[in-house]
Image (cartoon, rainbow, N blue to C red):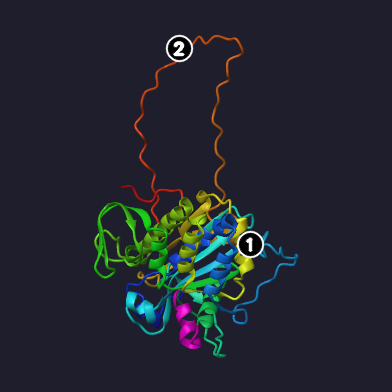
């Protein structure tokens, strides 16, 4: 990573960054993870065609730094077969039309939450890495669709999206500038991207009958419209939306963006569990309802074709939920501004592992073999009496702190 500047000028987008907003990114992530089984398991090609038609497409190829193309002949059933895939998922804070009625009207467009979704070449792992919006990074010079070129700078990560939108005036410029920023600061090649807003999030949650979650303490946020009682709750669309938006209030957390990222990760994991555990995958009507809501307000790159979607999904149909991992890129308070963050050396290792298609947190330790007792020889008589088993109190449930610790869909993040 390059060195951080001693002082950082707060970009224009940062003036809006403290406003509460939701994250349509949740829909994009839940869609991507759930789709690993959906298309292959259901075999409903018409569903895939409808989803593809739902999405707006933009071509960023002329504005994104070129990357080497694979030399081997692509698999017609999965153009990405044998290759790792990196998908950039951006949650846009768009405040017009239906979105304005939910989050309040505001001019322009900003990116509030970003995740890099890495799918391993052998299709055995999916890793979702959150990038805090307040991360101080190097933002390269970006070219817009109107021909304008911005100067390279150092500032908040989410200002890359705003720079593209403010100077180019369109989604193509905003997405391309963000992609270039991610590639320069991580070393990754971004193969595809999706930009999502929050207009259809409530309908998606309601289409699966709500999202069951453990709420460890009472949560109340007047600004987000959240009021939850501690215990197991099934969040409907509006409540899930409020949970995703809440940053300040009773039981919500410390008010930081990092804590809100953790809550969003928990919500996404709960949504994935619900989709994978119910008959959404095998019921065409529920499937169409869920995924139509998920893609209704989604913009993707022009290469996110039907073949890419269905081929990738089919080859991920057998992935274990324990191999779907959520984490936030390691960071620390920025030396130049305690209200901003900068990535640590541990972050360098995470990005390097992803570049090389290794587990983001390194290889998992090999389990220690368990000692076994030799069975008695045929005809032998046992001479040692069997000792009665003494009841043992169950061990405390190990929990992971979402937003601060990596966790999988199988892990426990809250106990009720």
Residue under pointer 2 = 385
In the image, 102: left or right of 165?
A: left
Residue under pointer 1 = 311
Magenta stretch, overall SS? helix
Q: Is residue 250 visible?
A: yes
SS under mark 1: helix
Along the viewing direction, whichever of 45 and 108 lies nearer the viewer? 45
Q: Which residue is painted at 56% across and 71% down in the image?
A: 52
Give the CA distance from mark 1 to mark 2.
59 Å
Q: Is residue 408 above or below residue 158?
A: above
Q: Where are the magenta residues, as a range?
A: 158-170
Task: Tell me residue 77's x, y (percent).
Answer: 68, 62
Considering the image in quadrants, where does the N terminus appear? bottom right
Along the viewing direction, whichever of 52 and 253 lies nearer the viewer? 52
What label does residue 392 carry, if any?
none
Nearer the camera: disc 1 or disc 2: 1
Sequence-wise, the earlier of marks 1 and 2 is 1
SS under mark 2: loop
In the image, 73: left or right of 413?
A: right
């Amino acid at each position: 990573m390059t060195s951080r500047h001693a002082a950082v000028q707060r970009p224009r987008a940062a003036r809006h960054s403290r406003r509460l907003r939701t994250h349509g990114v949740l829909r994009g992530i839940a869609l991507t993870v759930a789709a690993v089984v959906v298309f292959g398991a259901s075999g409903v090609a018409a569903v895939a065609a409808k989803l593809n038609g739902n999405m707006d497409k933009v071509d960023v190829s002329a504005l994104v730094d070129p990357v080497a193309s694979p030399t081997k002949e692509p698999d017609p059933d999965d153009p990405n077969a044998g290759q790792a895939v990196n998908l950039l998922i951006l949650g846009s804070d768009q405040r017009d039309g239906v979105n304005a009625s939910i989050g309040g009207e505001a001019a322009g467009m900003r990116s509030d939450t970003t995740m890099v979704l890495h799918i391993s070449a052998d299709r055995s792992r999916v890793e979702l890495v959150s990038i805090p919006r307040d991360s101080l990074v190097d933002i390269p010079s970006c070219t817009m669709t109107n021909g304008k070129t911005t100067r390279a700078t150092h500032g908040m990560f989410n200002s890359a999206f705003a720079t593209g939108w403010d100077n180019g005036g369109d989604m193509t410029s905003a997405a391309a500038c963000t992609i270039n920023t991610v590639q320069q600061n991580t070393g990754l090649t971004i193969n595809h991207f999706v930009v999502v807003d929050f207009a259809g999030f409530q309908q998606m949650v309601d289409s699966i009958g709500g999202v069951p979650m453990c709420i460890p303490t009472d949560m109340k946020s007047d600004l987000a419209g959240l009021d939850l009682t501690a215990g197991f709750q099934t969040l409907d669309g509006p409540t899930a939306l409020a949970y995703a938006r809440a940053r300040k209030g009773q039981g919500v957390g410390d008010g930081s963006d990092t804590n809100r990222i953790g809550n969003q990760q928990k919500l996404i994991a709960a949504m994935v569990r619900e989709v994978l555990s119910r008959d959404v995958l095998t019921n065409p009507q529920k499937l169409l309802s869920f995924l139509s809501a998920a893609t209704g307000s989604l913009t993707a790159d022009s290469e996110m074709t039907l073949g890419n979607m269905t081929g990738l999904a089919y080859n991920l149909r057998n992935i274990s939920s324990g191999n779907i991992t959520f984490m936030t890129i390691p960071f620390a308070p920025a030396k130049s501004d305690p209200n901003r963050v900068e990535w640590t050396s541990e972050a360098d290792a995470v990005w390097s592992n992803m570049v090389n298609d290794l587990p983001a947190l390194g290889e998992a330790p090999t389990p220690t073999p368990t000692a076994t007792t030799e069975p008695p020889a045929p005809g032998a008589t046992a001479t040692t009496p069997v000792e009665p088993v003494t009841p043992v109190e169950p061990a405390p449930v190990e929990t992971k702190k979402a937003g601060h610790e990596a966790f999988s869909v199988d892990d426990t993040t809250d106990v009720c």
